[in-house]
Image (cartoon, rainbow, N blue to C red):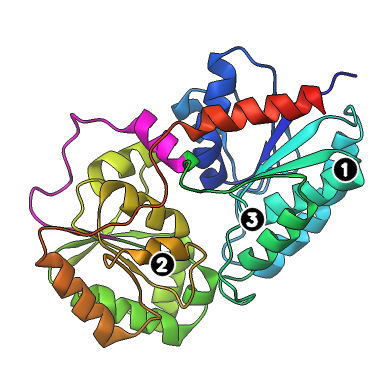
Amino acid sequence: MTKKLLICLGTHAEYIKMFPIIKELEDNNLSYEFISTGQHDLTELVETFGTSQPSFIVNQRDGFSGQTGGAFKWGLQTLPKLIKRFMQEDKKSIVVVHGDTISTSTTAVAARIAGLRVAHIESGLRSGDLREPFPEEIMRIIVDWLAKYKFNPTEYGNTIYDTIRKLIDVRSKPINSKQYAVATIHRHENIKSKERLTKIIKIINACPIPVYFAIHDNTKKKLEEYGLRLNANVFPMPTVPYKEFLNRYLKGASLILTDGGSMQEECAYFGIPCAIMRMQTERKELLKSPSQFLTKLKINPTIKFINRELKTSNYCFSNPYLRVEISTTIVAKLLQVLFCE
C-alpha cells in the first residue's frame, strides 16, 4: 500500500470550499483520491466545476429533508462503511475533511478508528454555544479534537476566496440593474421554530428594495406549514448553480440577509452589508465591520441596520481574510506532512 491524501467530502458546500485544493492537486498532477460520503449527490456539481468525480461513494443519500434525526441515523449507517474503506489504506495516509457537517464528523471518527491521520480544513471556528448552531458547533469540537492537522481561516486566507476568484466572471450582469437584496435561510434552529421564522420573514418583508429569496425545499415546507407569506417585493428565486448565483445574484447585491456562515465570508469579500439572521455566529471576527450585523432576530434593530446600510455609499469593512492563494499553501503543507512525518 502507498500512503496518500484521501479527500472525503459529503455536501455541496464542502466541495465548493475544497474545490481550489482539489484543483491545485489536479493542475499539478499530484496524486490524491476523492471519496464522497454520499450525503449529497455531488455528480452534477463536480462536472460543472470540471474536476474528477469521486472514485468511491460510501452511502448515497442526497440530503435529509431537514430531519436532524435522519442525519444522525445516516451517519451511524455510514460509519462502518467508511471504517472498512479506510482500513484498506496505508496507516500513514491522511484523510482530509472540511467544515462541520455530519459527513465531516463521521469521516473523522472513521479515519481515527482505522488508524489514519486527519486534516481539518476550516477548523477552529466556534460560536461558543453548543445549541447555536446545532449540531454544527458540536461537530466542530469533535473534528478538531480528532484532527492532527488543523487549517484555520485566518489573515493568511480562506479557501472560499480562492473559489470565488476562479469562478468570478467580470462580464456577467447582475439580475437587477438597481439596488436589490439576496436572502438565504436554511438553518434547522431557524426553520424549525415558528417564532424564529416569523421574525425572519417580517424582516425580509420589511426590506425597502427588491429581495431575491433563495428558498430551500425545507424552508418552503415550513413557510407553508406556518402560514407565512412573502410580500410582493420578495421574489422566490429558482435553485441555480453556484457560479450563476455568485455572478448574477451575489456580487451585485446591495444587501444580504442570511443565516449562512459562508455567506458572511462572501459578503466580506465583495464588500456587501450583511444582516446575519442568527443568535450566534462562529465568524465573530467579521463582526468587527459595522456592515456585518448579528441580528439575534431582533426586528426593529435589524430594520434600522438595513435602512442605514442602504443609504451608505462608503461601506466600512474589516476583512480578516487576506486575498491570497491559501489553497496552494494548504496543499504544500499537506504534502510535506504526508511524506516527511
Quarter occupied by the N terminus = top right
Which residue has dot 1 on it?
83
The relative height of residue 2 versus residue 228 in the rendered view (above or below) is above
Residue 101 image label? 3
Which label sits in the foreground, 3 or 2? 3
Which label sits in the foreground, 1 or 2? 1
The spot of residue 116 in percent (x, y) is 86, 38
- Residue at screen point 27% across, 57% down: 317
The relative height of residue 153 versus residue 201 in the rendered view (above or below) is above
Label 1 and label 2: CA atoms lie apart by 36 Å
Instruction: Mark yes or no: residue 250 visible.
Output: no
Of pointers 1 and 3, the one earlier in the residue sequence: 1
- Mark 1 is surrounded, within 10 Å at the Cα level, by few (under 14), some (14 to 19) or many (20 or more) other residues, namely many
Please state which amino acid type lies under the numbered disc 2: Lys
Q: Classify residue 331 by image quadrant.
A: top right
Magenta segment range? 160-182
Q: Nearer the viewer, residue 96 or 36?
A: 96
Which residue has dot 2 on it?
220
Q: Secondary structure at mark 1?
A: helix
Of pointers 1 and 2, the one earlier in the residue sequence: 1
Q: Nearer the viewer, residue 318 or 84?
A: 318
- Mark 3 is surrounded, within 10 Å at the Cα level, by few (under 14), some (14 to 19) or many (20 or more) other residues, namely many
The relative height of residue 138 versus residue 249 in the rendered view (above or below) is below
